[in-house]
Image: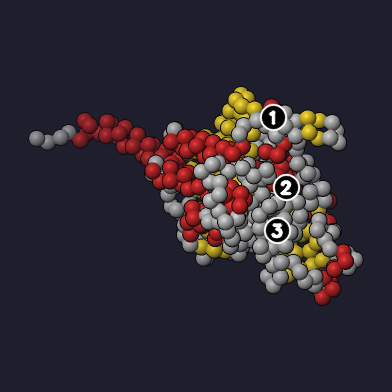
């Protein structure tokens, strides 16, 4: 029997157009928009991970993650403490642009991240993602500043650091409340048992992944640990040779492992970008071989472990010394997710997506990076191999290092910032000083 093609052609055309439309829609969502997880720890030092030389504890899950993507040896955050570092991550802008560059927010603070700031969550939400913040927020505890008003559809966690739980600030006679624990805007617990915080955040992340919808998801998982006071669940106490601190890191590694296992069980690991880093240098841990720690603009205060994986697109087993910072995540994720950044917004980070996809063939352009101290002042600048300290950093030893003028270090030769070579390179001192002064004046 012969089929009358003319008779069936309109039906065939409609079917073809619907099929093409369906394929295009899928390409713009599931295929071209990977899921995104930012696993953000608190005060974890450069050497507090096995693959970065940790001593006294093991981190097999995060080490394996590093082997399945790119491990960065020059990965930076834009601040030495919690609040400004988080503001920089979520906006792609130096914290001074948000007026959050001085110290941190407290339970008595009235301010926070302005709702006028455009966050990574807002960008990804408008780009078709579901958005979730799990863990520590620390960008303002007043309702207008909280995650649900900053682009996050879901919030499960606490508004500030765990050491602010029921703390008395004697200088201003202020008694902070028991640490508030929220689900969205509802207070669900006061003064939670902190030994279970890591476990609770992990279980929530796993649940959200399993109960995801059709849209790609963005989960910003900001753990409280290893910020002091340190807490680990009973299952991890006594597990490491490095005391409670090692136990805490091992539980964070377990957390990453549980999430990765869930992604694999759900069949979405290949198309998920997993970013691991810390908000600043260590208070209790190690930044070896770097000098300094949390709250200092020495390398140990702002150079942190950094791992990025995307099995579907990013090659595995790569280690790079290219300079990257958390400021770069905003424009990079915008490009990868096909999301748009509104015109008129000044972004300080750069899009490194081409480098991530082909790190052997691509290099990143040299650019300055500015180190703002806890007091909000610009203390140092890095450009390529050179780092210039413009002012005394916390921990400066005047007796051994003499009167401070300017301190220049070649980080390629002197990663520990021990040999001040300013007198040998006055032209570099002048160049970097002028760059820093001009930049700070703009801000």
- State the residue lying farthest toward the right: 403
Question: Disc 3 marks which residue?
Answer: 300
Residue under the image location 61 percent in, 37 percent down = 194
Question: Disc 1 marks which residue?
Answer: 178
Question: Disc 2 marks which residue?
Answer: 81
Crowdedness of circle 2 by 10 Å Cα count: few (<14), some, many (20+)?
A: many
Residue 400 vertical position relative to residue 311 in the rendered view, above or below: below
User: Which badge, 2 or 1, is on the more N-terminal residue?
Assistant: 2
Whole-percent x, y for residue 88 in the image: 69, 46
Of residues 66 and 311, the one drawn nearer to the viewer in this rendering: 66
Residue under the image location 82 percent in, 51 percent down = 377
User: Which badge, 3 or 1, is on the more N-terminal residue?
Assistant: 1
| Contact (Cβ within 8 Å) of mark 2 with mark 1 | no
Crowdedness of circle 1 by 10 Å Cα count: few (<14), some, many (20+)?
A: some
User: Which badge, 2 or 3, is on the more N-terminal residue?
Assistant: 2
Residue 399 vertical position relative to residue 183 in the rendered view, above or below: below
Image quadrant in which you'd find residue 104: top right
Residue 374 vertical position relative to residue 303 in the rendered view, above or below: above
Residue under the image location 78 percent in, 41 percent down = 99
Whole-percent x, y for residue 109 in the image: 78, 33
Whole-percent x, y for residue 113 in the image: 72, 36
Crowdedness of circle 3 by 10 Å Cα count: few (<14), some, many (20+)?
A: many
Whether residue 264 is visible: yes
Q: Is residue 159 left or right of residue 232?
A: right
């Amino acid at each position: 029997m012969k089929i009358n093609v003319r008779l069936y052609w309109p039906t065939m055309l409609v079917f073809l157009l619907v099929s093409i439309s369906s394929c295009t829609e899928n390409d713009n969502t599931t295929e071209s928009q990977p899921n995104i997880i930012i696993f953000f720890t608190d005060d974890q030092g450069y050497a507090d991970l096995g693959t970065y030389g940790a001593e006294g504890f093991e981190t097999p899950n995060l080490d394996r993650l590093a082997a399945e993507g790119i491990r960065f040896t020059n990965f930076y955050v834009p601040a030495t403490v919690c609040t400004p570092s988080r503001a920089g991550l979520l906006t792609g802008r130096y914290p001074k642009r948000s007026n959050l560059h001085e110290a941190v927010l407290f339970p008595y603070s009235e301010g926070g991240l302005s709702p006028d700031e455009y966050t990574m969550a807002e960008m990804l939400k408008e780009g078709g993602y579901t958005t979730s913040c799990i863990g520590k927020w620390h960008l303002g505890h007043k309702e207008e500043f909280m995650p649900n008003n900053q682009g996050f559809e879901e919030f499960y966690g606490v508004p500030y650091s765990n050491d602010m739980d029921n703390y008395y600030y004697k200088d201003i006679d202020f008694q902070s409340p028991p640490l508030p624990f929220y689900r969205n805007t509802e207070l669900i617990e006061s003064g939670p048992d902190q030994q279970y915080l890591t476990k609770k955040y992990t279980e929530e992340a796993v649940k959200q992944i399993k109960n995801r919808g059709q849209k790609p998801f963005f989960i910003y998982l900001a753990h409280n640990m290893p910020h002091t006071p340190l807490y680990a669940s009973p299952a991890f106490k006594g597990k490491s040779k490095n005391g409670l601190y090692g136990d805490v890191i091992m539980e964070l590694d377990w957390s990453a492992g549980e999430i990765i296992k869930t992604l694999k069980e759900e069949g979405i690991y290949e198309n998920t970008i997993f970013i691991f880093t810390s908000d600043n240098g260590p208070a209790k841990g190690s930044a070896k071989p770097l000098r300094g720690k949390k709250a200092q603009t020495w390398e140990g205060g702002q150079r942190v472990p950094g791992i990025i994986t995307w099995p579907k697109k990013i090659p595995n087993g790569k280690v790079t010394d290219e300079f990257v910072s958390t400021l770069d995540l905003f424009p990079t994720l915008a490009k990868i997710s096909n999301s748009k950044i509104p015109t008129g917004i000044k972004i300080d980070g750069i899009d490194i997506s081409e480098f991530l996809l082909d790190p052997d063939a691509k290099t990143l352009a040299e650019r300055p990076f500015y180190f703002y101290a806890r007091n909000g002042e610009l203390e140092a600048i890095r450009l390529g191999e050179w780092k210039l300290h413009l002012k005394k950093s916390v921990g400066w030893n005047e007796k051994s290092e003499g009167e401070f003028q300017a301190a220049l270090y070649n980080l390629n030769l002197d990663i520990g910032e021990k040999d001040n070579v300013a007198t040998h390179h006055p032209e570099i001192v002048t160049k970097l000083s002028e760059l820093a002064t001009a930049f700070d004046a703009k801000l």
